[in-house]
Image: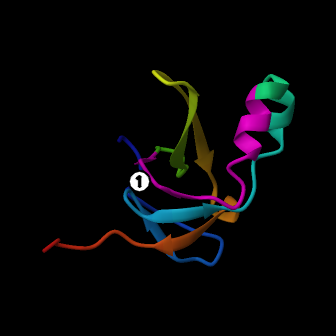
Amino acid sequence: MSGSSQVVDCNGRPVTVGSMVRVLAIAEFLARDLPPDEFAHLQTMLGMVFPVTEIDKWGGAWVELEVPVDANHFQSHSLSLAANEMELVSSPVEGGT
């Protein structure tokens, strides 16, 4: 990760790698830039909760959806979320037990 280690959600709460966030919106430009089937897969992420796997240098919080294709294969869809596109559900546990 080369960017900021923390961004904020739609309510201004801090989001870090490991935070669980709910997808509230998908960036409009993706509807124009992606093939319709790929955009349709991203739209299935709306309302779902995912762990943040990366914070990029532009402040995007990355989440990923794996969709089974068949018994042995998965298709992965990654999405970068801006603050207004996500809501913090829970933060990672500090220090562990």
Above or below, comparing residue 20 to residue 74 in the picture? below
Please name whichever residue, 49 or 85, is drawn nearer the observer in this view of the structure: 49
Q: Residue at x 37, y 59 (%)?
A: 18
Q: Tell whether 85 sits left or right of 16.
A: right
Binning the other alpha carbons within 10 Å of mark 1 as few (below 14), some (14 to 19) or many (20 upward) gives some
Q: Tell whether 19 sits left or right of 79.
A: left
- Of all residues, the one furthest to the left in this rendering is 97
Colour style of the rendered protein structure: rainbow
Above or below, comparing residue 78 to residue 95 in the picture? above
Q: Which residues are magenta?
A: 38-55
Q: Residue at x 56, y 31 (%)?
A: 68
Residue 58 placement (x, y as % from top left): 54, 46
Please name whichever residue, 46 or 83, is drawn nearer the observer in this view of the structure: 46
Please name whichever residue, 70 or 51, is drawn nearer the observer in this view of the structure: 70
Residue 90 placement (x, y as % from top left): 45, 74
Q: Residue at x 72, y 62 (%)?
A: 24
Q: Tell whether 8 sits left or right of 4.
A: right
- Of all residues, the one furthest to the front in this rendering is 71
Image quadrant containing the N terminus: top left
Q: How many marks?
A: 1
Q: Residue at x 53, y 52 (%)?
A: 59
Q: Amino acid at mark 1?
A: Ser
Image quadrant containing the C terminus: bottom left
Residue 88 placement (x, y as % from top left): 54, 71
Report helix, strand or loop for mark 1: loop
Location of mark 1 (residue): 4
Q: Is residue 39 magenta?
A: yes
Residue 82 placement (x, y as % from top left): 64, 55
Q: Is residue 15 magenta?
A: no
